Amino acid sequence: MTSDDFRAAAHTAADLAADHLAGLAAGPVWQPMDDTARRALLDAPLPAAGRPLDELLAAVGRDVLPYPMGNGHPRFFGWVNSAPAPAGVLATLAAAAMNPSSAGGDHADVHLERAVVRWIAELVGFPHPPGGGLLTSGTSMATIVCLSAARNRAARAAGWDVREDGLAGMPPLVGYVTGETHSCVRKAAELLGLGSKHLRAVATGPDGRLDPAGLRAAIARDRAAGLLPFLVVASAGTVGTGAVDAFDPIADLCAEERLWLHVDGAYGAFGVLDPEIAHRYAGMARADSLALDPHKWLGVPVDCGCALVRDPAELRAAFSLVPSYLRDEAAGELGWFSEYGTEQTRPFRALKVWATIAHRGRDGLAADIARTTALARRLGELVTADPELELLAEVQTSIVAFRLRPSGPTGRTVEADEAALDALNRELPAAVQRRGRAFLTGARLDGREILRACLLNPATTEEDLAVLLAEVKAAGLAHTG
């Protein structure tokens, strides 16, 4: 391949990406793939001979780009998936062209990652000593990294060397979560040998926030039983409702009990940039670790999470292993990133983070986030004003939890009505998605089926909110009618 061949193909690829992004709002949010298109991808034979780049790009335009997940569309309100920031899209190409391993060494990606991790910490107001964090594939991996450090610190305090001896024979370590804590915390506990039965689900108050009094009581019970409490996981925005825990009283208790405080900020930590809701995050900076996802509210193209820790030595104690073939006498006192987490070969994630943040700046990012939280509050108002809709939780960040509640007497018991409402709202997300004009997802909250709309795209308008609610009601009418 000549450089001219590559340049021509790159221009074609840029045109494909630009046309795709420009056309998103005019098309359906999501549509099921027809069977022929699906089978063409699933059953594609392994090619014996290569194909020219122009043919490959034509196939991408024909067989892939017409069938997106939908998260680039302004009426995508599902899960916690953002539209890609254009600057991050462009930077991804340059990062792939370099294709380094960002494990360590003296090259641009390593130094840029140290800078952007510091930027992320500055954005959310978290203390950042040199070496106090790294980029990961997402918060699921960042959680494993942070909880590994917490586990090893607690074991060391109890006289155990987990890296050498494992957990066998050690009194169980116990962590404290809520019923709304993200599933990645349970996965981390299972993978780290802690066992999910040693994660205690602490009660929450009516506002969905962890109850410090309930936490204190749970810790006391476990200590009395001879167990070793070591971890509390608080949330900077639950996935179900966007609730933000009250960090200061939790941090006070953790300091008193000598527990590691980890904050799951995957979705919500960047909400601290919005002056309207920044007060909710008071005390978040007191945590021992914070996991968050630039690929959510900031719009950095997937994948990119970040683990931030107060004490970098705890990460290095948990992960550092430098075989002879990786010795680098010029690495300096911080060593390599591979000493702070599980990955040895690491992709160049930092460039797309740098581009996304540098393109918008702190003020631009804050304005984007403030817009989505304001739209979420407006959606909450629209739900409250509609007699056939019910708001199920205070709108604290940019997630709105609600359900369709058709009016009119049924002549049935309350229990039967609740069962019917559950059945209806369980079916609605898929029904709305199939209609193609909006996309939202569901969950369970306090034993009830809910609809949840997550607003992350600053291109969303109030008209889009009206379309969403109209689609929910239309899908509900089609289901019941």
Image: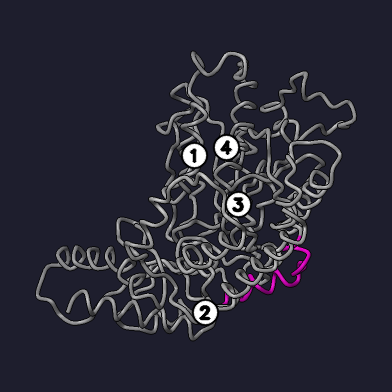
**Between tags 3 and 4, which lies in front?**
3
Judged from the image, the secondary structure of the residue bearing numbered disc 3 is: loop
| Amino acid found under the numbered disc labelled 2 | Ala
Judging by the rendered image, the residue that carries numbered circle 1 is 176
Labels 3 and 2: the sequence-earlier one: 2
Labels 2 and 4: the sequence-earlier one: 2
Q: What residue do we see at 49% from left, 50% from top?
A: 210
Percent coordinates x, y for residue 75 in the rendering: 48, 75
Which residues make up the magenta segment?
A: 355-374
Q: Quadrant of residue 469?
A: bottom left
**Between tags 2 and 4, which lies in front?**
2
Q: What residue do we see at 41% from left, 48% from top?
A: 179
Badge 1: residue crowd in 10 Å (few <14, some 14–19, many ≥20): many
**Distance from the alpha carbon under mark 1 to that under mark 2:** 42 Å
**Between tags 1 and 2, which lies in front?**
2
**Distance from the alpha carbon under mark 2 to that under mark 4:** 37 Å
Judging by the rendered image, the residue that carries numbered circle 4 is 144
289 vs 48, left or right, is: right
253 is higher (above) or lower (below) than 331? below
| Amino acid found under the numbered disc labelled 1 | Tyr
Labels 3 and 4: the sequence-earlier one: 4
Judging by the rendered image, the residue that carries numbered circle 2 is 25
Badge 2: residue crowd in 10 Å (few <14, some 14–19, many ≥20): some
| Amino acid found under the numbered disc labelled 3 | Asp
**Distance from the alpha carbon under mark 1 to that under mark 4:** 16 Å
**Distance from the alpha carbon under mark 3 to that under mark 2:** 24 Å
Percent coordinates x, y for residue 256 in the rendering: 63, 36
